[in-house]
Image (cartoon, rainbow, N blue to C red):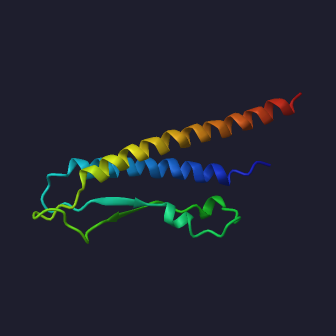
Amino acid sequence: MLNLSGMSVMQKTLDTLWLRQRIVSNNIANIDTPGYKSREVKFEEYLNNLTPGETLKEKDVPDARIVTKSDTSLREDGNNVDIDKESLELYRVQIQYEYMVRKLSDEFSNIKTVLTEGRR
């Protein structure tokens, strides 16, 4: 029997990275909107609360949450979007997404190998 909990975490991570890319892009698009408050996606924080060595069941994989950062203002118009921070975050998300796609692809390749080698 295959343990798919790792793949569930990878899938949730890909979903979260896609959402994070949308949120960061939206923040950048609203850089000139007076009163706009930037948002961020929280996901890793929930995974960090796990006990080391704890096996995560598929139903226990947390969902990402969108949080509005309303406690700061960078400009007089109330907007708090930091273009340098958002651009760096967009780049970081792109790299993480590519890594997770590669990792998930490798996992499927390993499963395929096990299934084809098992027939011999």
Picture coordinates of residue 105, whole percent (x, y): 61, 36
| Direction from residue 2 to residue 33 in the image, left or right | left
Residue 4 vs residue 101: left or right?
right
- The residue shown at (19%, 60%) is 36
Instruction: Residue 2: give x, y in percent of width and height.
Output: 76, 48
Residue at the location (12% across, 59% down)? 34
Horizontally, residue 100 falls left or right of residue 70, namely right
- Residue 110: x and y in percent read 72, 37
* Apparent side of residue 38 relative to residue 88 in the rendered image (left or right): left
Given the current orientation, which residue lies at the most extreme right position? 120
- Residue at position x 67%, y 40% in the image: 107
Foreground residue, 118 or 27?
Answer: 27
Q: Residue at x 61, y 62 (%)?
A: 59
From the viewer's perspective, is residue 98 above or below residue 46?
above
Q: Is residue 69 above or below residue 105?
A: below
Q: Position of residue 10 (x, y in %)?
A: 58, 49
